[in-house]
Image (spheres, rainbow, N blue to C red):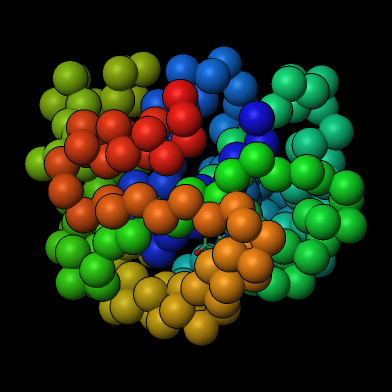
Amino acid sequence: MKIIFLGAPGAGKGTQAEFVSKELGIPTISTGAIIREACKAGTDMGRKAKEFIERGALVPDDVVIGIVKERLAKSDCDKGYILDGFPRTVPQAEALDAMGVKLDAVVSLEVPDEEIVRRMSGRRVCPSCGKTYHTAHNPSPNGDACECGTALSIRADDAPDVVRSRLQVYHSSTEPLKEFYSKKGLIRVVVGADALEDTKKRTFLALGI
Ligand code: AMP
């Protein structure tokens, strides 16, 4: 299956994508995680992307499209994949079409803005393996450390003022994709504002798995 998770930053795309990935045995491709890795490694792309990420802006389409093209060419994508955080603009969605990708479903994970701002304050990420947690809704069994043992940290772009810019960017640039994929009959709306397990059930139901 080829699945896209659409939704505001902090809606829980990464967490739900991980559940589906385990269930179906297909990889999750998170452009955010790939870009953060590149920033940490200090590659050319990482250095260019850093200034966009830090102010809550989108990294330019051509850069992200290049990342995805390269990643989808790897053999673990042969049986399908989940895209988490891509596409985020109509030109990115058009580029995916141009790559010849035939999607099975686009899950639109819907959470009100106020809930997003509240959630982001509890989000923690592992700087080593990239796994994400939430202090209240999805805590690590190791407390302040990841399951891999590394101390968890707070993403710089989860600061409240950056979150508000990211939400604005989501509404202006990414939300139009709901219309784009509705026209193709691919959208499955999932309410994501309740408990994690409820969202998981609704997501699996929406995907027929
Ligand atoms: P995420 O982890 O998905 O919230 O992504 C973190 C940041 O990476 C975003 O705020 C953007 O700056 C950048 N990013 C990730 N995916 C994309 C994308 N598809 N297009 C543009 N920028 C992206």
Residue at the (47%, 51%) spot, across then down: 188
Q: Position of residue 46 (x, y in %)?
A: 67, 55
In this rendering, the answer to whether 59 lies above or below 71 is below
Residue at the (61%, 26%) spot, across then down: 27
Location of residue 41 by image quarter = top right
In this rendering, the answer to whether 84 lies above or below 172 is above
Where's the N terminus, which quadrant? top right
- Taking the image as shown, residue 26 lies to the left or right of residue 97, namely left
In this rendering, the answer to whether 20 lies above or below 134 is above
Q: Is residue 35 visible?
A: yes
Where's the C terminus, which quadrant? top left
- Taking the image as shown, residue 185 lies to the left or right of residue 93, namely left
- Taking the image as shown, residue 139 lies to the left or right of residue 52, namely left
Residue at the (30%, 18%) spot, across then down: 147
Q: Is residue 63 visible?
A: no
Q: Position of residue 105 (x, y in %)?
A: 59, 44
Q: Position of residue 75 (x, y in %)?
A: 81, 21
Residue furthest toward the left?
136
In this rendering, the answer to whether 132 lies above or below 27 is below
- Taking the image as shown, residue 30 lies to the left or right of residue 128, namely right
Residue at the (25%, 58%) spot, across then down: 120
Q: Nearer the viewer, residue 141 or 199?
A: 199
Q: Nearer the viewer, residue 52 or 25?
A: 25
